[in-house]
Image: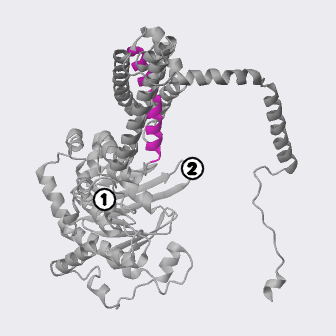
Amino acid sequence: MTAATIAPRHWRRPPLIKRASLRWALGLSALVYLALALGTIDVNWTRVWEGLPRGARFFAAFFPPNFTGRWNDISDGILESLYMTVASTVIGIAISIPVGLGAAKNIAPRAVYYFCRGILALSRSFQEIILAIFFVKLFGFGPFAGLVTLSFATIGFYGKLLAEDIEDTDPSPPEAVRATGAGWLQWINYGVQPQVMPRMIGLALYRFDINFRESAVVGIVGAGGIGATLDTAFNRYEFDSAAAILLIIISIVMLVEYSSSYVRRWVQ
Amino acid sequence: MLQIRGLTKRYRTGDLALKSIDLDVPDGQVMALIGPSGAGKSTVIRCINRLVEPTGGMVILNGANVTALGGRELRRARRRMGMIFQEYALVERLTVMENVLSGRLGYVGFWQSFMRKFPQSEVDQAFQLLARVGLDHMAHKRADELSGGQRQRVGICRALIQNPDLLLVDEPTASLDPKTSRQIMRLIKALCEERKLSAIINIHDVMLAQLFAERIVGLQLGQIVYDGPPNRLTAEVLTRIYGEEDWSATIRKPDEDGDEATSQPRATAPLETRQPHHDRDRMAGLT
């Protein structure tokens, strides 16, 4: 009885853009732009067709992978890459801890905050390849340039994530630690560190993984490691050796991935 | 022991949280600070140990002007003021023992605390305190494995191991059930008596304040509007503090019987009552 007297009221989720005309105009212009953009791409289908068997021959040359032919070069390259990875991860994280602490808004004074954020922005604004080209010019060919590249890139990555994790911490345990009369370092060690530690251990392993993959890339521009070996193999058309290198890289990355997820579960 | 003179706090947003508060807390007094949310209760106790920087006025603890201290002296002054928090504020990923020992951070050097090499006397003291609150069997558990009441008892141990002269207690029961709330308040009260401590307890449960405090201060919009014994807290006073409401069910009758009667603030017989309370706390800890 009473239900019948209440008029049905319509409800719809309010749209993101209120004006209907603007909404439609934006949607249409996006479609037009997409059509025009696709029109500018000139795909030569005959070349694609002719390229297919060439691609097949190229991939066939990868098999069987040849581990033995260039084993000395490969093992040297892998070891060099691993040294670069371990050293750059350790150095990069060691430097990024003070930088990250300084870049956390809730614990650093304003001036320190802007300075450390500046360091992080600088480190993050260049991709590893660009940094590697720069450092190869600076220090000459070889793994040292790669080591500096990866350490520098690690600072930006790890420092930023550390700073953001610190900014997300629960403020009350640190407040309680401060109320006991603790000093600054004790305050960090007891109030902040336990809150960020598990995630930071996981991220350190993740960065190790990234650094290993990047060590293969920076080698191509002359910064040493397995990338240099891989580049040489391609230049000599030794695709079977290149395949062996790629398989080794894949297996090491998978190994790191598996162990890091195991460790992360264990530290939680 | 504690004198507060003209304490004023204006937040950066422009809100005047405290309007020139004057307050004296003598030795060994357990005082409850009541008042509606936003009255400035939290700000008062945080201005005393300067977790919040007062805008004006003085806080004098045992003759020393806390508001004038800087750096190392301030940290030394903070050691004399133990603080207990609303949401316990334990470091959840640390063990119970580390949380209790963190109360000694003002006394030990950085490396000592970093390596967790606290002096044996402090470790002994930590175990004694945990035993006193019925949690010595939990020393090696992580703080996040504990129940709310257990966590608050660890918080109490952390404050007491500082060897404070004054306890600053911020809404100790706000996250606890009624029974645990009473146990925690009773424990704080008993420990203050044992150790001759003064305490300022922020609490918004008027009934608990009346039960366990010997003096009640009512705060409203940053000003003290009541200061007196619990039994003079009439409907008219509560209206002054909180505003118009039917207060008849809130005000405790002096002749209320049962469990409450034994723990009335003035009805003290600590030596007789301590043992049963201790066992009851332990039971609460185990269940």
Is residue A21 rendered magenta in the image? no
The answer to whether the residue labelled 2 contacts the one labelled 1, judged by CB atoms less than 8 Å apart, is no
Residue A104 appears in the rendering = no
Say if labels 2 and 1 share a chain: yes
Q: Is residue B135 above or below residue B75?
A: below
Q: Which residues are magenta?
A: A143-168
| Pointer 1 residue | B143
Q: Quadrant location of the N terminus of chain A?
A: bottom right
Foreground tag (2 vs 1): 1
Write down the chain letter for disc 2: B
Report, in whole angstroms, how far the alpha carbon at label 2 lies from the one at label 1.
Answer: 35 Å
Image quadrant where residue B140 sits:
bottom left
Q: Horizontal and vertical percent for residue B209?
A: 38, 75
Dot 1 amino acid type: Ala
At horizontal 32% and vertical 49% (from top left) the residue drawn is B65
Residue B13 has which mark?
2
Compare residues B30 and A180 and report the one nearer the observer.
A180
Compare residues B238 and B22 and report the one nearer the observer.
B238
Q: Earlier in the sequence, mark 2 or mark 1?
A: 2
